[in-house]
Image: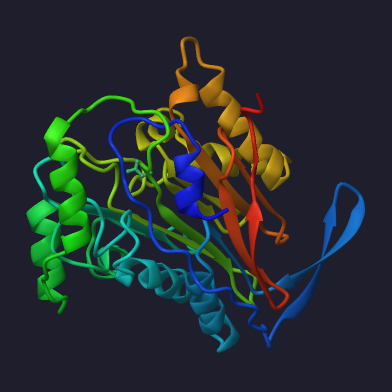
């Protein structure tokens, strides 16, 4: 089940996003794996590093990240390069170039990145620059700040050599024109809507980094920002413990500081899978939660290289590249009936 099919089958909020391409199946071999031993609930578990996981079916992106890791690159380089694959993919209408616009026809991007030291950078409401994740990295590395927004973020990117370009493709423009006929800004059932690319990697040294990039909710209000550039919500990395990244309706992730929650649950001893499940339960168990109308999904990895993924609705998936196998793994989910 690719991302398109997932979202078609899921009740989500607001007006629709057409989701990106299904990507080629890759079974690339990781040639420089480092075997590690790890203890999990008393059992001796063997894992292989390096390791990459990402939200949804993005095998070309995880393959790129693994290529970086196999060549001796670090986790930070890997997640940036991996996310850039999806940002450049014009067929993907939820990330980077070709992303669906806001209700005024503007494509606005949110992204963040976090390294093994806990350093982080983010951009919000970035326009005309395809590689938002790379601008986020520049914010982290070349400024004293964590986050730049809007025109300031764009001018910063240009000053760093990023070329401004029109991100609204003909396909996304047509989709927006169609949406404008009714211009309904309310929950719609069974319509393609949303997805964010989040990626987590552990390199051969056992160090973790993560990144997250999105064009956000399609036809959103001008100025709307979701969870993806918010450190602790869309992404959190703690190199002692593990990392988590979120996808789905950002407002609900922000309200529960989802990615930080998952990492803290892992700190308390939960496996990544259980931590993701607990974070979803915090959303669905809220009084008056309308969780049947939206999707949230988490993926997580711990320091031992164990992974987990969980979502509210069916058909969320994680792409995992480990031990030479690049595979899409269907996520378990809450709403079984
Ligand atoms: N999760 C991405 C967003 O809500 O914008």
> Looking at the picture, how far across and down is residue 298, in whole percent?
55, 44
Using the image, determine if residue 93 lies above or below residue 313.
below
Q: At which x and y percent is residue 292?
A: 49, 23
Relative image position of residue 62 (x, y in whole percent): 53, 71
Q: Residue furthest top?
A: 287
Front-lying residue, 161 or 335: 335
Residue nearest the observer in this picture, 90 or 283: 90
Report if residue 85 is visible in the image.
Answer: yes
**Residue 126, visible in the rendered structure:** no
Q: Is residue 205 left or right of residue 48?
A: left
Residue 34 shown left or right of residue 101 in the figure: right
Location of residue 52 (image quadrant): bottom right
Q: What quarter of the picture does the C terminus occupy?
A: top right
Q: How is the image coloured?
A: rainbow
Horizontally, is 239 left or right of 176 in the view?
right
The image quarter in which residue 219 lies: top left
The residue positioned 38% from the left and 67% from the top of the image is 86
Where does ligand 1 appear, by image quarter?
A: top left
**Callout count:** 0
Q: Nearer the viewer, residue 305 or 128?
A: 128
- Left or right? Give the position of 306 relative to 257: right
Relative to 253, residue 337 above or below:
above
Residue drawn where x is 24% and y is 62% of the image: 98
Question: x, y percentage for residue 261?
Answer: 54, 36
Residue depicted at 28% across the width and 35% down the height: 15
What residue appears at the point 57 percent right and 31 percent down from the top-left corner?
280
Closest to the observer: 326 or 272?
A: 326
């Amino acid at each position: 089940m690719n991302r398109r099919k997932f979202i078609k089958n899921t009740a989500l909020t607001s007006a629709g996003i057409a989701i990106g391409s299904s990507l080629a199946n890759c079974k690339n071999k990781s040639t420089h794996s480092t075997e590690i031993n790890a203890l999990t609930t008393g059992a001796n578990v063997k894992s292989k590093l390096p390791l990459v996981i990402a939200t949804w079916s993005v095998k070309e992106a995880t393959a790129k990240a693994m290529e970086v890791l196999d060549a001796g690159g670090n986790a930070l380089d890997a997640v940036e390069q991996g996310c850039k694959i999806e940002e450049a993919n014009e067929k993907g209408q939820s990330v980077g170039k070709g992303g669906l616009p806001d209700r005024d026809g503007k494509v606005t991007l949110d992204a963040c990145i976090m390294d093994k030291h806990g350093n982080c950078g983010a951009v919000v409401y970035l326009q005309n620059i395809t590689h938002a994740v790379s601008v986020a990295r520049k914010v982290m590395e070349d400024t004293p700040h964590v986050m730049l927004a809007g025109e300031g973020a764009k001018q910063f990117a240009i000053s760093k050599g990023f070329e401004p370009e029109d991100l609204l493709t003909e396909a996304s423009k047509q989709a927006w024109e169609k949406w404008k006929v009714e211009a309904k800004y309310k929950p719609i059932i069974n319509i393609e809507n949303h997805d964010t690319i989040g990626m987590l990697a552990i390199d051969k040294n056992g160090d973790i980094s993560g990144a997250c990039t999105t064009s956000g909710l399609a036809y959103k209000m001008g100025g709307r920002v979701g969870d993806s550039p918010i450190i602790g919500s869309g992404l959190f990395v703690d190199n002692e413990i593990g990392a988590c990244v979120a996808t789905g309706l950002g407002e609900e992730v922000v309200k529960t500081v989802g990615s930080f929650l998952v990492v803290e649950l892992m700190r308390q001893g939960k496996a990544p899978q259980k931590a993701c499940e607990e974070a979803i339960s915090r959303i669905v168990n809220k009084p008056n939660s309308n969780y049947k109308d939206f999707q949230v999904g988490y993926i997580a990895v711990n320091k031992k290289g164990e992974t987990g993924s969980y979502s509210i609705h069916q058909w969320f998936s994680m792409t995992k590249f480990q031990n030479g196998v690049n595979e899409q793994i269907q996520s378990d989910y809450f709403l079984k009936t």
